[in-house]
Image (cartoon, coloured by chain):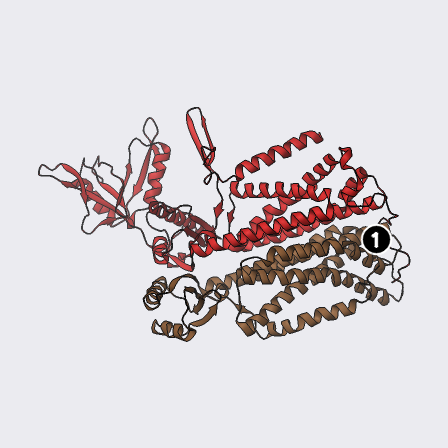
Chain colours: A red, B brown
Amino acid sequence: MNRAWAWVVVVIALLAVWVDIPKHQFPFPFDCPGICYTLGGKATFIEIKTHLGLDLQGGTQLILQLRPDKLPSGTTTSIDQLNTQARIVIDRRINSLGVSEPVIESLGADKILLQLPGVSDLKEAQDLATRQAFLEIKVPDLDANGQATGTYHSLTPPLTGANLKPTYVEFQGAGSQPVVHFDFGPPDDQRWVQLSKDFLNKPVQITLDGKEISAPRINQIFNSGVGIIEGNFTTQSAKNLSTLLNSGALPVPLDVVQSSRVEPTLGQDSVRRSLVAGAIGLLLVALFMILYYRLPGIIAVLALLFYTALTYAIFRLIPVTLTLAGVAGFILSIGMAVDANVLTFERLKEELRNGKSLRVALDEGRRRAFPSILYSNLATILTALILFNFGTGTVKGFALTLIVGVVVSFFTAVFVTQMLLHGAIEFASLRRRRLWGVEERPTDGRDGRAPASVTA
Amino acid sequence: MLFRFVERKLWYFALSALLIVPGAFFLAIGGLKPGIEFKGGTLLDLRFGSPPTASELHDVFGTLGHPEAVIQGAEGGRMEVRTLTLTSDEIGKADSTLKAKYPTFIGDDASTVSPSFSAELVTNAVRSIVFASVLIVLLIAFAFREFGLSAFRYGIAAIIALLHDALVVLGLFAILGYFLNVEIDSLFVTAVLTIIGFSVHDTIVVFDRIRENLHLNRGEALNPVINYSIMQTLARSVILTLLALYLFGGYSMRTFALALVVGIVSGTYSSIFNASQIISLWQEIEDRFRHRGGHGPAGARATA
């Protein structure tokens, strides 16, 4: 049973190291930066990489406030729906811009967090997020014979999506074909009726911010603004078109309540300094642990390496976005991991000094150190959970790394360290008491009893 | 060798008071300077090869229509400019003006927060600290539930130690804010919450020892048990503090690092010299109140 667990830990360690290897920087011998496999002719690629926060790679952050109070009265859409729709719109705009790894999240119901790595133009970012997009129906240019030429022009005044009610997908006909249902509200319904008369059997172009998203053909003369767009839709493609039609314009005005721009050079400098400080710190901790605790110290360092590899792998997999504060949380959790080991080893030493055998001392040491480790870690996790709930941006990143770090450190300290310690005493040569940091002969210990000579 | 941690408790309380009172004074007169995150406005962090003087920059922002700008020099040729909320157009204009006027102007970080949003941040910061404290009292009371109602004593003592550490750091930053205009931001709140976590962590380790030793020494007086328990955890506390100081001392965010370092030292002090002493004092007051004069261990009696 013990042996099986040892293999589990080894497998976890190997997987963690594999995830940690920066395959983007070292393509050889890794042919793909992440998980690639082909199953039944379908290739899958899941990229694995470290996600750096804005403060580490530079960019722009906006916090946008939804302003439903600026909508015309009588709007019934809930704030949650408005939030979702607004995020879809912004997401689409950003995608068309080619920003890599943007963050678009809701902050509570009425705010949206937007992070654009690599975008340093605040004005561009604000425009992108707050401009009211523009859906327009264009009509075909006709040649001398009245045939469509494949180009389109605007009507005067332009027929826009301003009065288009939310579209949806419905299923029609014998084969339950998916179609997109639309409805122009007045006065555009009359214009639509007129347009269907003028351009019967010709395609019209639906554009969003000037780009074509669909060019359906008019098959009949409409007598109202209500109709359907049919085509060889799958359910998904019909849904996509419907979303596009609906999400062209922001459903609600947005105000910028916070904006910040971070220069990437500052970020990179900070990363390097923090990494160097962290590396030296870890090295000193390792040195100290080994000199002070001897063999258990070496085991603690192994456990600490396992801890660091696993935590970093989890950060890359979830993924947790690393910010400067996040790195601080990571370092803090390393401290907690060391503490758990120190607590256990201090107990272990006491038990050994009290004349217990190694095996008994190990079990006793763990049993007696466990409550302090458990409750002190719980206190930290509670605090971090509260931070995660109430905080924004930086604070959230800090809290998340701290939570992941403390959970992994708890697992490492009470499980992996113990396993290694028990493994070590299997070897006769490792059972010498000097290696465990105590004298060869047990001194007469007091077993936690207060000396009687001291009075209050 | 046994250090008399408990017997001299009034001296340790006095030392804590000495540390807290000046800070509390500056806190009371509004020394704590909220950053733009908490009060709204724009902060421009300008970087120059060779920076112009503050009054020169003040004139530049005056001509841009922002005479309220507060200019402050920072290390590495940086100048911090605080103004009322600037629009993105205004920030762009300031950038181009600076670029034209100063050839050594490298670039800037800009952050803007609207006042309504900042009010929300303050509420959240306060709420999270209160909420965390309540949960920690409950957690410790649960961990020490074998002591019955006295378990809350341990929770409350831990919170007093925690408030001690928070006050030391807040007081320090109130003093720094008053004399050097050092501002606090949400990273500072993060630091304070980290300190709270660290402080409780330390206190729990000591308390857990006291609990265990009370178990092993039923009938023993409380004070010697506390003394002994602190001795047993002392090595660990000192090691951990030195480690924490090292890890965070080298951290590149200066105010964050300063807050953490001071808080960690304070947290170690309060868990060794304050938290258990509060338990002892509480017990002594209770004993005196009951006209018993004896000092049986709190926990042993509570569980009996």
Relative to A45, say whether B60 is above or below. below
The picture places residue A32, in percent across and down from the top left corner, at: 45, 34
The picture places residue A415, in percent across and down from the top left corner, at: 69, 39
Q: Is residue B151 visible?
A: yes
Q: Which residue is mark 1?
A: B214
Q: Nearer the viewer, residue B259 or A367?
A: B259
The picture places residue A421, in percent across and down from the top left corner, at: 73, 38
Relative to A420, say whether A369 is above or below. below
Q: Nearer the viewer, residue A174 or A19?
A: A19
> Tag 1's secondary structure?
helix
> Which chain letter goes with mark 1?
B
- Residue under the image location 37 percent in, 34 percent down: A236
Relative to A160, say whether B42 is above or below. below
- Residue under the image location 61 percent in, 68 percent down: B172
Quadrant for residue B63, please give it. Answer: bottom left
User: Where's the N terminus of chain B, which quadrant?
Assistant: bottom right
Amino acid at dot 1: Leu
Quadrant for residue B302, please give it. Answer: bottom right
Q: Nearer the viewer, residue B217 or A29?
A: A29
For label 1, count other residues whose C-alpha is less than 10 Å away and answer few (under 14), some (14-19) or many (20+): many
